[in-house]
Image (cartoon, rainbow, N blue to C red):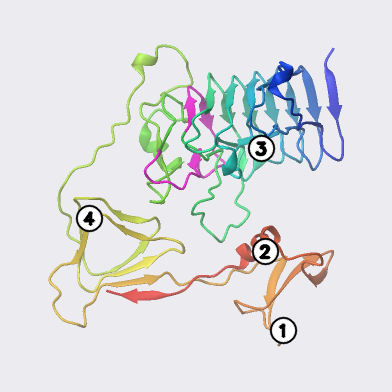
Amino acid sequence: MRTIVSENLWGGILIGNFCVPTTHRIEPKILINWVEFVSNQYHPSFEFFSCQRDRQPNTVLDFTGNRVDGGSGMGFRMEPAVNTITLVSSNQFLNNNNTALMVRNAKFPQLMNLPAEVTISKNAFKFNSGQYIISIGMNEDAPKQKLVFNQQNEVRENVITNPYPHLKPRSTPYAAMVVSSSNVEIRRNCFKNPRADYEIAAELDEHAKWIDARENSWGHQFPDNFMHRIFDQFNRYSLATIEVNPFAAVCNQRNPTSLPRCNITASSGRRASQPAKYTVIDDLHVVAGAKLTVAPGTILEYDPGRWNVGSGRAESSRLRRISDPVTFTQKPFIIPHVENIRLMDENYNEEVTAGRLEVLIDGQWGTVCNRSWTGKPRSAGVQPTRSHNGSSIL
């Protein structure tokens, strides 16, 4: 008979953070098998707090054969994951109104010398909704940490929401899977989330690193149909690269040698540009050895948060006269109208970029916060109303 953890208002099961000296010769083991976590609220349905001390035995966590369904908090959270050997296998994460699974160490750089071995395999992540469904990553460059996400995990039919629709993400993307370190291996899984802008996204802000996401199925047979759904260095030069080549044309583990490879090549050449106004929607990256030539009189309008990056050369062709400069400028930004949040100055004018922050609750406007104005509420309040402007001329 299954154990049922259902409809709790403060989450489901919380374990930790239990530490034991190695001199006791104890190997802690936690088995969570065949449990139904249903409609638990606010906090995670299951959460494990790792022991964060040095010289500790690894806690063995086996989270297998469970169903996590209909929660408003996270489904499974282990943050950080250290001093552990963890297996998350053959579970169903369904209909959760939040992140289904989070195993992430990025907030704890001081723990990079502690060991961790995490395997996530054969799980189903379906019909969930949130800013991201899966968030995984160890401490970057940690010598004794490794996470493997493999063997037919199905990440399908999830809904990804951007809480700040007026802002395009730079280093915190919204995707079915977000990866925050390069010591993660993502192999032989199935992705298809039509209601997401991106299937997988890099959160690792180190452009010299790459993330191994080869031999996965991305829901389409041909790369032209899914490459734009990979958010990495191609979109933002400062992020790590996600390597998806070779990829699986179908969701199938058999015959790995027959996987087709991405037939995406680059070639040298010239393409004449005419003086006009162009909108730059992603980072403009001129790689080493390349040259970007822009016609006189051209105007490059950048979406907010987009940059020029030059390892190669950028020049203007035949600068005819001083009245024909190349102009780099910000795309005009219209202050968005957000129904339940506003900025207001002392004259009760709402068309401002600085002022008193107010929110609408139960039909009444009021200021925030009555306790403290820390980083988290400040970010949540400012991002929906943020504006950008500025220009320069070359």
Which residue, given by chain and number where applicable, does mark 2 sit on? 378
Which residue, given by chain and number where applicable, does mark 1 sit on? 348
Which residue, given by chain and number where applicable, does mark 4 sit on? 312
Q: Quadrant of the N terminus?
A: top right
Q: Quadrant of the C terminus?
A: bottom left
Res. 28 in view = no
Separation of marks 3 and 4 at Cα, in angstroms = 40 Å
Residue 319: mark:
none
Q: Are marks 1 and 2 in contact (CB under 8 Å)?
A: no
Q: Earlier in the sequence, mark 3 or mark 1?
A: 3
Helix, strand or loop for disc 4? loop
Question: Mainly helix, strand or loop, the magenta region?
Answer: loop
- Picture coordinates of residue 177 (x, y %)? 55, 37
What's the residue type where badge 4 is placed? Gly
Separation of marks 1 and 2 at Cα, in angstroms = 21 Å
Q: Is residue 151 magenta?
A: no
What's the residue type where badge 2 is placed? Arg
Q: Earlier in the sequence, mark 3 or mark 2?
A: 3
249 or 164, which is in the foreground?
A: 164
At 82% from the left and 32% from the top, the residue drawn is: 12
What span is in magenta?
183-209
- Picture coordinates of residue 232 (x, y %)? 43, 44
Which residue, given by chain and number where applicable, does mark 3 sit on? 79
Foreground mark, 3 or 4? 3
Helix, strand or loop for disc 2? helix
Foreground mark, 1 or 2? 2
Quadrant in the rendering for residue 60: top right
